[in-house]
Image (cartoon, grey):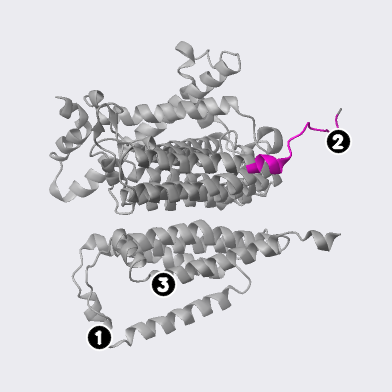
């Protein structure tokens, strides 16, 4: 089966770009598991987010790729960084690179990887044949507005509710103070 | 003849490419497209620093740089040599790797944004299907670079500056994107090249730019306000307010790394102005139909220089806002107006073109603007300022 995967004919440059992306994703995630300083872990994880975005772009999914950068690199990483700084700013270690329980982290990461890899490899026929379908952003917008307009509205409603909830929590209650 | 001058850079690239073996063509072609961007915009940065110091000097009743070269024109070169020869000081407790990477990431993200900017006819690095989305995605990386700089310095001033900068960038990114959405609704595409093409053509003398519609002019103003805040410029320069937190997130940087932050900030400003030109000011097209003989790239850079001069003018005119003023301005005025603008753009799209549409949409823009500002003014309870600790 391994020979079958390797035998697919791809230009060499595509292989090289895939290798770079794979190193970015895997290296970033591994670093996030073993580094000591939580902020470093977030930054390492951001590298792997960017790598995944690059992978989406390589597969021709522009919209998903750019959204990945916008949401994960631009928002989730900042949010995570803020969360760490608000909760444990005093406990951020200054010395040392690797976490004390780096081995546990590495073990967890490799275990998850093994399970995922096994699940993919045991799939009969190794997944569907690759169809080179590049979906334009216009098509995505069209299907969101016509076919999937109800789910879109429901998601919008949910997000609005979450926003209002956040505002209510953050509001200082004047009655309590008096 | 005019066409040759207009396409001179494109033709030059094709001419050079003929001397390259076929195997190396894609990579050489990419390099040949990237180099002009890497040269032109830093050069523009050098000119802008001189222009800004001269302009601000003029506004503040002084001379500005006048020692190096005629009218101080070699000042940017002197500045460059100075920052190259300065000692690179890194604080002892700083996080060295992150401290080193932050300015690089900032400049790299700023340069990436130029990939989708059409600087002339057929002069765009990549015509992405989702170009505008790419621009904002790359722009969001800047926030991370700012955080890295502020946090890794292990200085309270840096961290405060970074926090202010991130809060400001996140707040003003919303109106920035919403003002863009109105244009996308009208043009029906996310590709920067196609947005420029939709604004082509002239009625008599005047072009069909989006800025000449009610929603376009409001969108343009909102976009430029948000762009000023995004690039941390006065009156929104709280993240680096010299009198408050010295220099904000890059206070612990010296020498060329400091210059890189400076470069990144200005490159970001040029890129956002360039996108504003693309979205509202018709990109590289000429402002009057009789002026189309002038090459497209000259028009783009002329518009860019005009916007830069407006930025400098505003910096010399307005005082710095307070943090609460900054936030309430973003969330109470700019954001509702951007939402109303999207609605007006929708109305514009579905009404039959003509004089009635113009009047209706202009009313829909002006009335909410006046009402909202009147409401906010009443809430603020303006009165004489009383000082607690000074008299």
Specify the label residue B388 is tagged with: 2
**Residue B129 lies in quadrant:** bottom left
For mark 3, name the chain. A
Tag in front: 3 or 1: 3
Q: Is residue B286 left or right of residue B15?
A: right
Find the distance from the CA under tag 3 to the CA under tag 1: 35 Å
Circle count: 3
State the residue at coordinates (30%, 45%). Answer: B195
| Residue A138, horizontal then vertical, whole percent | 30, 59
The answer to whether residue A35 is seen in the rendering is no
Q: Evaluate if marks 1 and 2 touch, with contact meaning CB atoms under 8 Å apart.
A: no
| Residue B273, horizontal then vertical, whole percent | 43, 37
Q: Is residue B137 magenta?
A: no
Quarter of the picture holding the C terminus of chain B: top right
Q: Residues within 10 Å of mark 3 (few under 14, many from 20)?
A: few
Marks 3 and 2 share the same chain: no
Query: From this viewpoint, which residue is outermost toward the top?
Result: B70
For mark 2, name the chain. B
Which residue is the site of mark 3?
A150
Find the distance from the CA under tag 1 to the CA under tag 2: 77 Å
State the residue at coordinates (50%, 77%). Answer: A109
Which residue is the site of mark 1?
A125
State the residue at coordinates (44%, 58%). Answer: A69
Q: Residues within 10 Å of mark 1 (few under 14, many from 20)?
A: few
For mark 1, name the chain. A
Q: Evaluate if marks 3 and 1 touch, with contact meaning CB atoms under 8 Å apart.
A: no
Decide which of A97, B288 is in the foreground and name it: B288
Q: Is residue A59 left or right of residue A105?
A: left
Label 3, secondary structure: give it. Answer: helix
């Amino acid at each position: 089966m391994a020979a079958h995967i390797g035998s697919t004919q791809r230009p060499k440059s595509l292989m090289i770009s895939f290798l770079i992306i794979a190193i970015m994703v895997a290296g970033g995630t591994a670093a996030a598991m073993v580094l000591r300083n939580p902020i470093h872990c977030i930054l390492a994880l951001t590298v792997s987010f960017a790598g995944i975005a690059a992978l989406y772009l390589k597969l021709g999914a522009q919209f998903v790729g750019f959204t990945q950068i916008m949401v994960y690199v631009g928002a989730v990483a900042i949010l995570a960084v803020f969360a760490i700084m608000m909760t444990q700013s005093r406990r951020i270690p200054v010395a040392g690179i690797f976490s004390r329980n780096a081995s546990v982290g590495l073990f967890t990461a490799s275990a998850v990887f093994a399970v995922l890899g096994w699940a993919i490899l045991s799939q009969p026929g190794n997944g569907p044949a690759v169809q080179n379908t590049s979906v334009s952003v216009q098509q995505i917008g069209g299907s969101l507005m016509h076919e999937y307009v109800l789910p879109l509205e429901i998601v919008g409603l949910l997000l609005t509710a979450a926003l209002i909830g956040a505002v209510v929590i953050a509001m200082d209650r004047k009655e309590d103070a008096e | 003849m005019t066409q040759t001058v207009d396409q001179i850079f494109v033709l030059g690239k094709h001419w050079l490419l003929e001397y390259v073996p076929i195997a190396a063509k894609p990579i050489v072609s990419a390099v040949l497209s990237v180099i002009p961007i890497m040269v032109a915009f830093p050069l523009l940065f050098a000119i802008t620093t001189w222009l800004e110091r001269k302009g601000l000097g003029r506004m503040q009743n002084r001379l500005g740089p006048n020692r190096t070269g005629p009218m101080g024109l070699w000042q940017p070169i002197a500045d460059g040599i100075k920052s190259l020869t300065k000692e690179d000081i890194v604080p002892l407790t700083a996080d060295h790797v992150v401290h080193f990477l932050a300015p690089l990431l900032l400049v790299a993200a700023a340069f990436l944004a130029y990939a989708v900017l059409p600087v002339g006819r057929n002069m765009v690095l990549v015509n992405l299907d989702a170009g505008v989305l790419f621009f904002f995605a790359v722009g969001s990386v800047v926030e991370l670079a700012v955080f890295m700089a502020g946090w890794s310095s292990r200085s309270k001033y840096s961290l405060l500056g970074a926090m202010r900068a991130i809060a400001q960038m996140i707040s003003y990114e919303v109106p920035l994107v919403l003002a863009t959405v109105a244009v996308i609704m009208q043009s029906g595409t996310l590709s920067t090249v196609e947005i420029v093409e939709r604004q082509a053509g002239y009625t008599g003398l005047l072009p069909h730019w989006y800025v000449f519609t009610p929603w376009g002019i409001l969108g343009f103003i909102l976009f430029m306000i948000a762009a000023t805040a995004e690039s941390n410029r006065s009156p929104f320069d709280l993240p680096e307010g010299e009198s408050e937190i010295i220099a904000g997130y890059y206070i612990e940087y010296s020498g060329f790394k400091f210059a890189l932050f400076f470069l990144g900030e200005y490159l970001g400003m040029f890129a956002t102005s360039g996108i504003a030109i693309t979205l509202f000011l018709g990109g590289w097209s000429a402002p009057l139909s009789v002026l189309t003989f002038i090459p497209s790239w000259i028009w783009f850079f002329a518009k860019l220089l005009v916007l830069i001069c407006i930025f400098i003018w505003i910096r010399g005119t307005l005082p710095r806002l307070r943090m609460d003023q900054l936030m309430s301005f973003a969330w109470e005025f700019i954001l509702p107006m951007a939402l109303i603008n999207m609605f007006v753009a929708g109305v514009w799209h579905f009404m039959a073109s003509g004089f009635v549409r113009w009047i209706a949409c202009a009313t829909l823009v002006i009335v909410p603007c006046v009402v909202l500002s009147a409401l906010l003014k009443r809430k603020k309870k303006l009165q004489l300022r009383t000082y607690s600790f000074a008299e």
